Image (tube, rainbow, N blue to C red):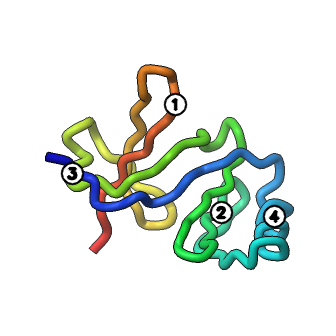
Amino acid sequence: MSNIRSFHHAAVSVDNVAVGVQWYISTLSACVLYQDETWALLEVGDTRIALVIPGEHPPHLAFEWSGAEDFGPLVGHRDGTASLYIEDPFGNKIELMEPQN
């Protein structure tokens, strides 16, 4: 039985968060859900995209996963979420986020 609640976001690397945010706003009509110097969470339609600075946050796919703590200790983040990262057999990062109430 799967504990996946939903797909949360895809995180892509950018060299400059502010420039990336402006591009996604002007080109894809994105809405900013969260932004700081090292990452931003945008919504494009019903899809969320995170823009991340390499070395600060890894490019990854993120899922809301009930029981994410079964994989290890969760880390709290500035935006109020808690999650952990695992890797697939090929080194791709997968973020498992505890569902928010």
- Disc with the residue nearer the chain's start (4 vs 1): 4
* In-image side of 62 versus 68 (left or right): right
Q: Residue at x 45, y 51 (%)?
A: 62
| Count of all numbered marks drawn on residues in the image | 4
Label 1 and label 2: CA atoms lie apart by 20 Å
Label 4 and label 1: CA atoms lie apart by 25 Å
- Disc with the residue nearer the chain's start (4 vs 2): 4
Residue most extreme to the left: 1
Quarter of the rendering containing residue 57? top right
Q: Residue at x 43, y 45 (%)?
A: 95
Which secondary structure lies at badge 1? loop
Residue under label 1, please give it.
92
Closest to the camera, between mark 1 and mark 2, is 1
Label 3 and label 1: CA atoms lie apart by 20 Å
Q: Position of residue 53 (x, y in %)?
A: 71, 46
Q: Given contact means CB atoms under 8 Å apart, are the residues at marks 2 and 3 in contact? A: no
Residue under label 4, please give it.
18
Residue 55, above or below 6: above
Residue under label 2, please give it.
40
Q: Residues within 10 Å of mark 4 (few under 14, many from 20)?
A: some
Instruction: Specify the amino acid type for callout 1.
Output: Asn
Q: Given contact means CB atoms under 8 Å apart, are the residues at marks 3 and 4 in contact? A: no
Which secondary structure lies at badge 2? strand
Q: Position of residue 69 (x, y in %)?
A: 23, 45
* In-image side of 39 versus 87 (left or right): right
Residue under label 3, please give it.
3
Residue most extreme to the top: 89
Quarter of the rendering containing residue 13? top right
Label 2 and label 3: CA atoms lie apart by 26 Å
